[in-house]
Amino acid sequence: MCGIVGYVGQRAAQSVLVDGLRTLEYRGYDSAGLAIVDGDQMQVAKAQGKLSRLTALLDETPLPGNVGIGHTRWATHGVPSDANAHPHSDPTGDFVVVHNGIIENYLALKEHFVELGHDFGSDTDTEVLAYVIAEEYDGDLKNAVRKAMARATGAYALVAMTAKEPGRIVAARMISPLIVGLGSDETFLASDIPAVLPYTNNILVVEDGEIVDVTADGANIETLDGTPVERDPFVVDWDPGRAEKNGYDHFMLKEIYEQPDVIEQTIGGRISSDGSVELDGVDWGEDFAVNLEKIWI
């Protein structure tokens, strides 16, 4: 599973994001990357391979700024490569997105932009999301994310940022996990609680179908139709070892009890509300079944 981190505050975002990604390495990944806004400039660094490859790039060319997002990727659409690593941007480079999960209708969305003459730099569904958000942008990133979610189908969590609105990150959840960490004049985002515990233990969980608007002053959560959500944070009192195991006594228990969520995240984006199964991206032509050589269950 991929890992997500985000930060808005007074600290150097690069160190916060790298520390968070390092905490999430246990989830498995094939590439890693960061995007940080400095003033009105969007900066991106990413690399295939271990996190150490990314940190080597950052040692050579640090990314200044106090607002940023980071990601460790486990390939779904597109092979492991520098180009397919997150974050991904729109053609202008003003909008960046990281995301966990699968956008089932990304090929249809992508075709729209190909017809407009755009060339994509990766094979990922995530890059398509960046294009959609940029197209929907009307001066408010939250509205653009909401409209993009209305066009996308699947099971995912996404985090978006734009140089046009420095000091702000907007994230959303559709099945894949997403949490917010509340600090003093700083706010954190992550796909898992341990990534933020070195900085805060005040946690908000973003639920399915919700959008969270994050600034250094805190986080505002809404449903997809714009209804405000009032939710009190809870305090996590795990020690570092327990945090790494997500609160369980040992890793075996963690893996056992996480199985329902893992299955839901894996198949959730492929099952519609009426119970029918949708497998976008599969060519169901006449020869499909004839050419099957093996079926794994």
Image (tube, rainbow, N blue to C red):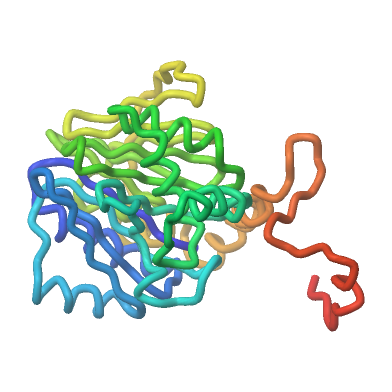
Q: Is residue 198 left or right of residue 48?
A: left
In the rendered image, residue 151, in percent from the top left (x then y), is placed at: 56, 37
**Quadrant location of residue 53?**
bottom left
Tell me the quarter of the picture where residue 273 sits. Answer: top right
The quadrant of the image that shows the C terminus is bottom right
Q: Is residue 267 left or right of residue 186?
A: right
Q: Nearer the viewer, residue 152 or 254?
A: 152
Residue that appears at 16% across and 49% down: 37
Question: Residue visible at 30% across and 74% down?
Answer: 47
Let me know if residue 146 appears in the view.
yes
Whether 144 is drawn above or below 67: the answer is: above
**Residue 247 showing in the rendered view:** no
Percent position (x, y) of residue 8?
Answer: 19, 42
Estimate the x, y position of residue 264 in percent, counting from the top left.
65, 50
The location of residue 82, given as percent across then percent down, is: 35, 75
Residue toward you, 202 or 61: 61
The mark total stands at 0
Q: Residue furthest top?
A: 227
